[in-house]
Image (cartoon, rainbow, N blue to C red):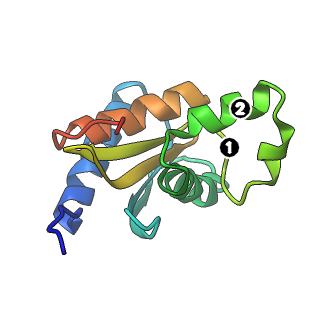
Amino acid sequence: MRTRQVLTLDDARRIAAAAEAEALEHDWKVVIAVCDEGGHLMWLQRLDGAQLMSVEVAPEKARAAVLARRPTKLLEDMVNGGRYAGLHLPVQCIEGGELIVVDGEILGAVGVSGVKPFEDAQVARAGVVSIGASCTP
């Protein structure tokens, strides 16, 4: 057996708080989701005025990043590059899902939805780096 790190609820709160601060700085109305290494939701928050559909999309972006073991931008690029079979994947292929990586291990992901996809990703990355993690394995 080996010992590994896991996200705590406190980590999820800190990630969400930093992501929220990034969104508010730009006046972006988003939904922020944090999931664990299995893609299970740990934290979900909808900023005032965020569209209702984003409540479904943000957790799916986080889940997609964990299951694919990569940021969802890479999945979106795959589809946009002509690999339309990616549309049949059981995950959300839209930028805005970023991995939470510590010491090369994927501990979970952050999904953000509500503004342009690259802005969603910016908000998610702000959350990830707030706990000293990176977005790449």
User: Considering only vertical position in the picture, is 101 above or below 121?
Assistant: below
Q: Nearer the viewer, residue 68 or 47?
A: 68
Q: Residue at x 84, y 28 (%)?
A: 82
The residue carrying pointer 2 sits among few (fewer than 14), some (14 to 19) or many (20 or more) residues within 10 Å by Cα, namely some
Image coordinates for residue 137, horizontal then vertical, percent:
34, 39
Q: Which element is circle 2 on? A: helix
Q: CA distance from mark 2 to mark 1?
A: 9 Å
User: Is residue 115 visible in the rendered structure shown here?
Assistant: no
Few, some or many residues within 10 Å of mark 1 (<14, 14–19, 20+): many
Residue located 31% across and 50% down the image: 16
Q: Quadrant of the N terminus?
A: bottom left
> As drawn, which residue projects farthest toward the bottom?
1
The type of residue carrying mark 2 is: Met
Say left or right for 74 vs 98. Answer: right
Q: Nearest to the eye among marks 2 and 1: give it.
A: 2
**Figure label count:** 2
Is 122 left, or right, of 49 in this rendering? left
User: Amino acid under label 1?
Assistant: Cys
SS under mark 1: loop
Chain-order first, disc 2 or disc 1: 2
**Point 18% across, 61% down: residue:** 5
Residue 133: mark in rendering: none
Quick check: marks 2 and 1 in contact, CB under 8 Å?
Answer: yes
- Height in image: 26 above or below 53? above
Percent across and percent down for residue 34 are 39, 57
The x and y percentages for residue 80 are 77, 27
Q: Nearer the viewer, residue 3 or 86?
A: 3
Disc 2: which residue: 78
- 17 relative to 21, above or below: below
Q: On the image, numbered disc 1 is attached to which residue?
A: 93
